[in-house]
Image: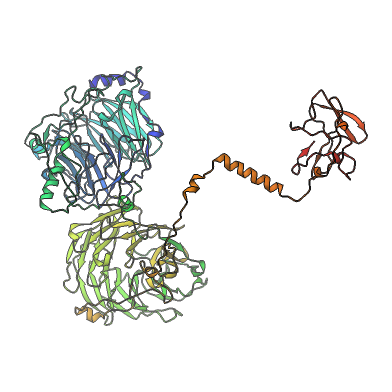
Amino acid sequence: NAGGCQWAYRHGEASADMGFPSPFQAWIGGIRAGSITSYGNNVKASCCWIAFNAEVSGVLGIVPLECEDGGKRTMSQLCCHSDVVTDFDFSPFDQLLLATGSADETVKVWRLPQSGQDMPSSAGLTLGPGGGPVDMLQFHPTADGILASGTGKRVTVWDMEHQQPLTVLDSHGDQLQSLAWKRDGRLLGTSCKVSVSHGPPRRGTAGLSVLGHENNKDSRLLWMGSSDCLISVGFSQMREREVKLWDTRRFSGAMLTMALDTSPGAAIPLYDADTGLLVLAGKGENLLYCFEVAPAQPALTQVTQCWTEGSTRGLATVPRLALDVMACEVLRVLQLTDTALVPVSYVVPRKVRGDFHEDLFPDCTGTLPATGAQAWWAGDSQQVSVTPGVVSLHPARRPTETFTSPIIACTRLQAASIVPTADTGPTNTNTDTDGSGYSSPSSLASPGSATTSLSASTGPSSGFASSPSQKSLQSILGPSSRFRHAQGRVLHRDMHLTNLRGLSLTTPGECDGFCANHQRVALPLLSAGGQIAILELSKPGRLPDGAIPTIQNSVAVADLSWDPFDPQRLAVAGEDAKIRLWRIPEGGLQETLQEPEAVLQGHTEKIYSIRFHPVASDLLVSSSYDMTVRIWELSTGREALCLQGHTDQIFSLAWSPDGKKLATVSKDGRLRLYEPRRSPLPQQEGPGPEGARGARLVWVCGGDYLLVSGFDSRSERRILLYQAQALPKGPLSVLGLDVAPSTLLPFYDEDTGVVFLTGKGDTRVFLYEVTPEPPYFLECNSFTSSEPHKGFIFLPKTVCEVREVEFARALRLGQSTLEPVAFHVPRVKKEYFQDDIYPPTRVWWEPALGASAWLSGEDRQQHRTSLQPADMTPVSRAPKEAPARKFVPASVYLQEKSDEQKKEELLSAMVARLGNRDDPLPQDSFEGVDEDEWVGAGGEYVCVCETLGAGPAAPLTPPGLRRTRRDPGTPRTTPAGPRRGRRAGGGAARPVPAKGRPAGAAPGPAAAMGPVPAAGRPRY
């Protein structure tokens, strides 16, 4: 059968017509696809649903495969994980069973509802965590309840019913890039950066391995059905994309290698075993290749190329049972673009349409599993039924029964017996099972939410409309931030500091570049000697062209920070492993400072960063290349504590809001949490960002959580949220932002819960509201500047203008300017104090205790104060205004006029307006004439023309009239037959007797005018 199908393609039954995008009407538009870096295909399809990576991290978009009533599809969202969804797969048997893998190291299995029902709020079961991000997933092709997942260098084969691994294959020497089951389920093939391997997973030992593609960029592997051949796609040593065919019986080398092109995008291969067609598309490209694979020759024959309108984000095939066989559709591919799902149909034209062609559509693999997980593991290798008549593609002979996997149902019942749930009404818990242990299709309903998972019940807004229900908008789109409409704007130029010259742009990555408090700003300069400019914020304007007073630090500046309790004290860390304390005179620098107030010595190598204690005065912490963190008592100038435990460069450190704990993140990829007064060693450690390019951290949510900004292994910038008391468990949520070289510098506003993130050299500032509940990060409007900034520092909350609902203010350092940027929330009742945005703020400028008291073990908290001006009333106490109800009587709708009636009324109004004019018309003074003065047919008429406002015009003869001579100065016309005179435009003209003139009118043409028309129009 398969050979007959291939014969049809090879012998040219319109191979040129195979592979064309469907008409625009068939596209599934209105989506927002995510652009993530993963080894997955980003889109998958079953006979019921299509799933794809949405724009929001951790969310999948779900859309029906077929149109519903009215030709429309309802978009839904499935909030799966707290981190990005890396891969997912539909069960080949249960068309509603979906498995998802994520960078949060878990695998979750979901039962999707029937069309028109709500998406599940929690997973049916959760597998893992597995010790690393899940990179790829694939269901077993013959046994129900078996799932293979790839993580790092390890493949895990799961028994989903018992939620435990059957085997772990960890003999791979490098990062896994793809895995694929053989169609008969006996062998599992994998590809790594440097090798291609296959083997029987039930033995639990390493299989055969061979050098794959010479370039270690992304590679993919597929089995050619139940044959012993493999297809791999990767890159050659010359960075050309290539396709290789392998025979596992002679696995020493590829039996065929074909160079494809030199495009850089990783190719996504799709192989259809029933037709022998191989479809290839590169990510980010708009070209689809289609080849016919013949392993016996071996040969790859190109069938067609298909150009698409949008760039490819993902690719998937539609199951054969969903094809339009009566239109000779042998293959359908779904192309995922940024805004649409584009079906690409491969059709073999036949002269007779509407008939079923047996040679094109042989009986395909059935949808009933051959065995279960434990039976397969015990050695059962039965094949899925392919008996003709059972799984025929003929519309009249297709199977009508469907299979429902009992995996989710078993898990639900076990959870219900352990965890009591609230009574939500009658529930049918009876399940009818047959002898094989599988439930009948009608016995299992769509599952509820009996088990809990890490994913949120509702995710962030992603632009997808939920399925029809009575849910509120928030339950459909997910929670949204109060600050989602926040706006950032640069303040007026009168507040800028301009003509900044000689700025140092080479400060270390651990330094923010400059620092500021509510009074002044400190800017490192490029000149020798580690000079620092001190500028007063109260004196904006253009700086003089000459030299200005500076601080002579004598060595290059590594980091600098203002004392929060003493606005005149500046701490500067130098590359000579010393910390210098400088005292700025009241009113600003008037002369160059050369002698520091104090010098702190103790570090043996260059210092990374310094931070003042947030609660206690005269306490400073510093980190250095000597792998130590030291706490200094400034009042005595001595080193009070020294913290150990770091093995590599310390990227960042931060005090907890209460000042009890200290957190660090370092280049070794570890987060450490210290309680300095208890032990010099870390209290706990946890995994940090993967990348070694830099990281920052800040305490959020009242000090219960840590937010870390860093990079992943692919250099994508991301933010991670940790629970401070559970660092070893890893991040609760990970959010990828973009790809850029600079480390994101986070600033957290503890009053609003909003975190601001930007990097040196960026033009964009990200805003997210951080919550302790899923989905943890609520996106807000970002701020974008016209040119890159060299630094971005936030000022204390007390400088904000609350009357303008300003909740944060920053200083943006440009090439030669320092600009204040205000972030405010648009509100209608700005005359009231917005107490929901301005809770009592911490009195940050007053210490709660001294250094000696803190070192002795005391803990105190700072007071809080309101930002409410005395003349403003809180909006919570504003008088409640009853909304005016706009009542429209029913008579208004009953008296609705048609368009024709409206036109008639408008025309009547215009005529009435013209009729109200007081100016007399010339014809009003005409004198009547006797009947005998009119000349009959063949007589004489007088016709004159005058344009109003332009004086007398030359007389014209209307069509059908001939001019005759009567008396000098008076034109005379005589009808050329029985017809009377007409206007030049075809309208009838009133004949004017020669003797009939208006009373008192002078003789001449003007005296013989008819009714006066509008100005400028001729009348006869």
In the rendered image, residue 488, in percent from the top left (x then y), is placed at: 43, 61
Seen from the viewer's position, the closer of residues 283 and 859 is 859
Coloring scheme used: rainbow
In the rendered image, residue 661, in percent from the top left (x then y), is placed at: 22, 70
Q: In the drawing, does residue 78 fall left or right of residue 921?
A: left
Residue at the outermost right position: 968
Residue at the outermost left position: 378
Residue 489 sits in which quadrant?
bottom left
**Quadrant holding the C terminus:** top right
Q: In the drawing, does residue 670 fall left or right of residue 893?
A: left
Task: Please name the residue shown 68% across and 48% down the image.
Answer: 913
Would you say residue 193 is visible in this rendering? no
Seen from the viewer's position, the closer of residues 691 and 683 is 683
Would you say residue 993 is visible in this rendering? yes
Q: In the drawing, does residue 509 fall left or right of residue 658?
A: right
Image position of 707 with respect to 71: above or below: below
In the rendered image, residue 257, in percent from the top left (x then y), is placed at: 27, 30
Residue 966 sits in which quadrant?
top right
Q: How many marks?
A: 0
Image position of 206 with respect to 670: above or below: above
In the rendered image, residue 711, in percent from the top left (x then y), is placed at: 29, 55
Seen from the viewer's position, the closer of residues 62 and 270 is 62
**Quadrant holding the N terminus:** top left
Task: Please name the residue shown 32% across and 80% down the image.
Answer: 598
Residue 66 sits in which quadrant?
top left
Seen from the viewer's position, the closer of residues 866 and 784 is 866
